[in-house]
Image (cartoon, grey):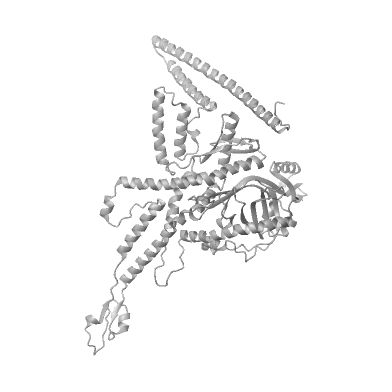
Amino acid sequence: MSKMTDSELLAIIEPAEQDAMIFNGDFMSENNRYLKEYLGKPYGDEVDGQSSVVSTDVSDVVESDMPSLARIFMGSGDILSFQSSSDNEIEVLEAEEKTKYVNWIVRNQPESFQILHNWLKDAEIQKNGVVKYFVDESKEVETVSFSGVDVDELSSIADSLKGSKVDKVEVVEQLEDDESGTFDISFRVTKEQKKICIINVPPESFLITKNSTSLNDAPLVGDRIRKTRSELLSEGFKRELIDQLPSVGEKDSQGEEIKNTRDYDQGGSTRPVINDWAGEEVDIHDLYMKVDYDGDGIAERRHIMKSGNKILINEPFNHVPYASLSAVLMPHKVIGRSRAEIVSSTQRQKTVLLRGALNNMYMVNNPRSVVHSDVDLDDMLTVRTNGIVRLEEDSQVLPQNAVFPLKVPYIGDRALQMLQYVDQARAQTTGAMLANQGLDSDAIGRETATRFDGVEKAGEAKIELIARNYAETGFRKLYEGIAWLASRYQDTATEFRVLGKQLTVNPSSWKYSHNTVSYVGLGAGNNEKMVSSLQGIYAIQQQLQAQGSELVDSKDIYNTLKRIVDGLGMPRVDEFFNDPEKPEELLKAQNEILSQSVEQLQEMVQQLQNPLADAEMVKREGELAIAQGKLDVEAAKLEEQRRQFDISASQKETESERKTATDLTKLELENNKNVPGALV
């Protein structure tokens, strides 16, 4: 069977995408409601003249979660790490390198904090939060101008503008000054950018086949985005193809309702009014779909980008580059529940109770009156300090019976009791504890420290579970996906800094699969408790080391100190402690100790140079000779340590090269292909 044509492929995509859009639309109305409740927007059933207050429970719970989540996922401690499944030294080193590089991509880019913050908050407010990761290959055009340049400088400037990331350098304008023989010149520099990017995907733009149990198993996963024609051109698409793509129409309302809610404070969702060709927006569907495109009977994952009825990209891509978070996981569903969804009913109940209590208070403070017909209504309706209300001259009604207030019973205390019950139910459901929920001061006094400690721990446990859900689902998918993407599509080395040290990584050389291990879910981001516990462990380690126990060594103590530094929010442990497994750090420390010893000996020599008695001089010279002897011994030991370190490093390098050559030879024999660097 032959490959599909574009029209045949579109015929398969359309119903699959429509199914995902319908599913997306069912969720969109719920997400829009949760967003409105978070923002405290009116429910739409307000009555003129009555209270329209809206409770803020959704916002309160979300904002109480965010500090703990920010400490966990945006602090200095590790979220996930790649670990080797064997003791192979090369595999272990590759796992460490992969951990540092992927963590740097996720957490150390210019917009990393905002991206991670928005991802976490999306999952808190709406049913899921989604990020997308991809290799961005684009061109950036920059105009650089110079004035008063002579011929010699002109050549050097042109050479300086060229580089590994520069695709083309063109002269766009050149003016020569005949008198001075200099030039005013402008260059157009076109740079090629290739980097791994992470972006937030709005929930209303995310597409996934309904009833899917996971991202990897879903027949279709993708998102709808809008790009300008200029952006498509910079990404390498032909202008002839871009001209055929339809512009975004005014009636294209996919997700407009939730966008209007999100942007209400800036006038709602509106498209920028740009009339030139480069600024026109195009609706792009970026899809990762399982389809039997080559007709072999097996559906494979393909990356398909389309706009209207035009296919822009169609290529094999055995990966789904999206990561999704849900605060509460649901069995057999890829999308779970949000914190806003759980507390939504509570906010609605409290809103009704608050409005009723306030309306009752308004009526109590401004009661209606029962008025006899003999009362002058103009006087009655005119509110005036010390004003009078007149009766008809021939009225037979006693004044005290002519006007009396219509009593409205006050129910505020009972409403507050109901509010207390709803708050307690919310605290039990969400773990968001209120310090003072009682109306009776005696009842507050009876609350014990043990009870509050138990409630606090129960609340922390709920946040721990949410953090664990995030780490084991979305963040694990993100870390593993970026490692997969980098190893296959990044063919150049990258330099970056970790803990103040320059590292160079070439992901194309990665050849091992590693397990990811999560460090999230212990203490719900409560660094104080974690540091306190680690300090207790450190004290036990010191006692064991003083006793000469084999249960602890320098590396164990270093690991404890490293975790303490991470818990304190300080990103660089090397500023405080040396790693015992890095000889260069230990040699540096030993050199410092040796330098201090030399300084002490020099001070002793200076003291001996003072006029002293002969006996005292002899005594000092003897001490100096002994100290000099000790110094020579220490220097000899240090030199021997350096020599042993050089021998060990050389042996390890030789062994590493031998193992690498052996592995490459094995690959060569298994695949029957010539592999550079193999033994044969």
Say if 477 sits above or below 256 in the image.
above
Instruction: Identify the residue shown where x is 40% and y is 40%.
Output: 529
Q: Residue at x 53, y 46 (%)?
A: 473
Residue 467 in the image: state x and y as whole percent.
47, 46
Q: Residue at x 72, y 57 (%)?
A: 7
Residue 509 showing in the rendered view: yes
Between 90 and 172, the one lying in front of the other is 90
- Viewer-proximal residue, 329 or 196? 329
Q: Is residue 226 visible?
A: no
Q: Position of residue 291 (x, y in %)?
A: 67, 51
How many marks the image carries: the answer is 0
Q: Quadrant of residue 604?
A: top left
Image quadrant holding the C terminus, namely top right
Q: Is residue 619 left or right of residue 397?
A: right
Q: Residue at the spot x=50%, y=33% of the render? A: 574
Residue at the far bottom in the pictured view: 394
In the rendered structure, the answer to whether residue 274 lies left or right of residue 537 reads: right
Quadrant of the image occupied by residue 662? top right
- Give how far across and how far down residue 568 sits, in percent: 44, 39
Q: Position of residue 393 (x, y in %)?
A: 24, 89
- Looking at the image, which is closer to me, 627 or 514? 514
Left or right: residue 242 versus residue 601 is right
Q: Residue furthest right?
A: 178
